[in-house]
Amino acid sequence: MVKFILRRFLYALITLWLIASFTFVLMKNLPGNPLGEGSERIPKATKEMLMKQYGLDKPLWEQYLTFMNNIIHGDLGASYQFPAHKVTDIIKQAFPSSLELGLISIVIAIVVGLALGIIASLKHNKAGDYTAMFIAILGVSIPSFVLGPLLSYYIGVKWGILPAGLWKGPSYRILPSLALSFGTIAILARLMRTSMLDVLNQDYIKTAKSKGLTNFTVVVKHTIRNAILPVITIIGPIFVNVITGTLVVEQIFSVPGLGKHFVTSVYSNDYTMISGLTIFYSSILILVIFITDVVYGFVDPRIRLGKGGK
């Protein structure tokens, strides 16, 4: 098991290194100038000083080595947009809002998605099933960047039921959380429905019913308990997907998270901010995948004893 964990950890480090390297290469090939628009009007002496300050006057290979060395020491550099602030400080300040939005969204998605999936399976080929699957199809078909403005306009502006934007109190969390969770609700609902229908056709469910157990007992203690296992396996990746998916929704609802920094950094060619946020979110994804692999190894020894675990 120790070898299995070490191997997965090594894979995680290699993946992170590749992501950081590709980010560096792509970042250096972005069109425009990292010093911003109008940099051609900056005096030559000032421009040379700025290039030296950010290490842009050095050869690419030296910039790359410095870049990787800083990452190893947890230093993502200073933002070009906000020279007085390091990228890590900006992440510490803004990420809590993104994390809160993601957590609320994933809770809504789990509760509503599982409920819809259970209802659809128990009411198979009936009105409840069709309604739940219609909602699931909408969730898959309508992305958050389309649903967000619709919710903000109709519920927030036109009808005035909830705040259309900003991040001031509990009521301000509802619309962005719904916009972010809708697609995940659809995924979980369809997966739970399929899993429930499969379990309901198993022999042990028929045996439980033949013993005289009530439908409620059969569903809660036997069906849901076994059907929810495939859902649990994808909660980790879905959580990361929701967290990283807050970038667009934050812009729509003016949430003070990392989304605005990521979008503005692309427009302004803020190299350090782009690379820092990319590596930060990639690290979260890699960590979740690593933990999931390790948990799988404990739960099912065949995974760590297979070809990939020798």
Image: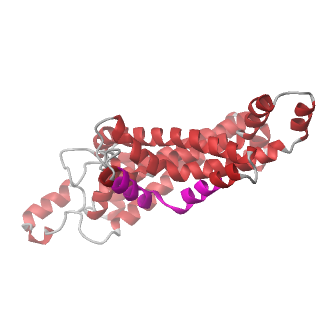
> Residue 86's quadrant in the figure?
top left
Say which residue appears at 76% left-offset and 30% top-offset. Answer: 216
Q: Is residue 30 left or right of residue 116?
A: left
Residue stretch in magenta = 133-155
Residue 66 in view (yes/no):
no
Q: Considering depth in this image, is 37 or 29 the residue closer to the camera?
A: 37
Q: Is residue 137 left or right of residue 161?
A: right
Image coordinates of residue 61 in percent, x first then y, are 36, 62
Quadrant containing the C terminus in the rendered view: top right
> Residue 177's quadrant in the figure?
top left
Say which residue appears at 57% left-offset and 47% top-offset. Answer: 237
Say which residue appears at 20% left-offset and 50% top-offset. Answer: 82
Residue 137 in view (yes/no):
yes
Say which residue appears at 45% left-offset and 61% top-offset. Answer: 22
Q: Considering depth in this image, is 70 or 151 the residue closer to the camera?
A: 151
Task: Report the predominant secondary structure element of the magenta stretch.
Answer: helix
* Total labels drawn: 0
Q: Is residue 299 magenta?
A: no
Quadrant containing the N terminus in the rendered view: top right
Image coordinates of residue 307 in percent, x first then y, are 77, 50
Image coordinates of residue 9 in percent, x first then y, are 59, 42
